[in-house]
Amino acid sequence: MGATMQRLLIPAACLMAATGAAAAAAAQDPLGAAKDLYASAAYEEALSALTSAREHGAPEVVHQADQYVAFCLFALGRKEEAESAAESAIREDPLAQLDPRDASPRIEAMFTLARKRLLPGLIRDAYRTARAATERGDVIGGVQQLTQVRTMLDAAKGINAWDETLGDLSVLVDGFLELSRVMTERRSAAAAPSPEPVTPESVPLAEPRESKAPPRTYSALDANVAPPVTLRQDMPTVPHGLASMMRTGKKSGGLEITIDETGVVENAFMREPVNATFDALVLGAAKSWQYRPARRGGTAVRYVRRIRVSVGI
């Protein structure tokens, strides 16, 4: 073989090797290959690579691929298709962030407007899913989903996608999460093992010291105690927009609150529950109630009060 032919074949072989290596890399990481094509303004080729990434990728890869589909369509001037792809990506993950290296300010604005349109409805759907989980006994799953709803509510407020219904849902979600926290604490306390018995010989001698007893909590059964005076005790009503989301077979129940020495509600729980939605509303409202504290002999004291509550729709 002549020297001239060798000089022609060697670059060709190098080019084929490089092309093969690129193809192998694309096969191993189609999303990465699509991002590289997008960065080099090869938008049509990037769309083809993104199709492969969506077919074979994990959920997080699929979601990123959907975002980049919107990027490519926007760059090609196919605005309506880009907006539809952005909405699809937002429905899959309402809180996912865009890669700032590839998302131009105009693309950011397109996603923000789409998220602003979709987020209120997605929040309501997520709340219904969380409520259904709690009603069928999946408390852990329900709490996890409600925590996600809480994050989505914060995001909606951050982009000014707020309305009156979301304000009502925010109160409900906070009440549910507080109710779950109280129930978890009570279950943990009930399941705590009893301390191991000890013999006198196993206890080291120590100097006697004065123990401080916890403050006593009074109630209507105690004489010579002036009960708390209500300063603010606004009872919740179920908003009309949420009435259809409740099951209100029972109309009234009993709330128990502990008011501390400053007149603040220290804790609250439903001694006679009504239903999960209304109970959450009541517990959420109780956190903001204010009283002039109970007094015994001129001294402010802790006081337990029981209150009848009823559903008003």
Image (cartoon, rainbow, N blue to C red):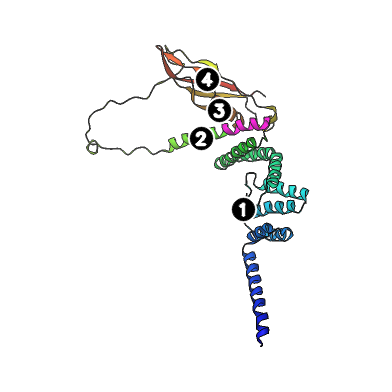
Q: Which amino acid does label 3 sit on?
A: Leu
Q: Earlier in the sequence, mark 2 or mark 4?
A: 2
**Label 4 with label 3: CB-CB less than 8 Å:** no
The residue that label 3 is drawn on is: 283
Q: Marks 2 and 3, how far apart in space? A: 12 Å
Task: Name the residue carrying label 2.
Answer: 181
Q: Which amino acid does the dot numbered 2 rest on? A: Arg
Q: Residues within 10 Å of mark 4 (few under 14, many from 20)?
A: some
In the structure shown, which secondary structural element does the residue marked by tag 1 occupy? helix
Disc 2 crowd, CA 10 A, few/some/many (<14, 14-19, 20+): few
**CA separation, marks 3 and 1?**
37 Å
Q: Does the magenta stretch include residue 73?
A: no
Residue at 54 percent across and 20 percent down: it is 307
Closer mark to the observer between disc 3 and disc 1: 1
Between the C-alphas of marks 1 and 2, the distance is 31 Å
Cα–Cα gap, marks 2 and 4? 22 Å
Image coordinates of residue 209 in percent, x first then y, are 26, 27
Residue 49 in percent (x, y) is at: 69, 61
Q: Are marks 2 and 3 in contact (CB under 8 Å)?
A: no
Residue at 55% over, 28% down: 283
Q: What element carries label 4?
A: strand
Q: Is the Cβ of the residue at disc 1 closer than 8 Å to that at disc 2?
A: no
Identify the mark nearer the N-term, 4 or 3.
Answer: 3
Based on the picture, tell me whether residue 172 belongs to the magenta stretch: yes
Residue 180 place in picture, x, y as percent: 53, 35
Q: Name the residue under label 4.
A: 290
Q: Residue 60 carries which label?
A: 1
Relative height, residue 183 to residue 226 (above, below)? below
Res 126 quadrant in image: top right
Q: How far apart are marks 4 and 1 (CA)?
A: 47 Å
Q: How crowded is mark 3: few (under 14 residues within 10 Å), some or many (20 or more)?
A: many
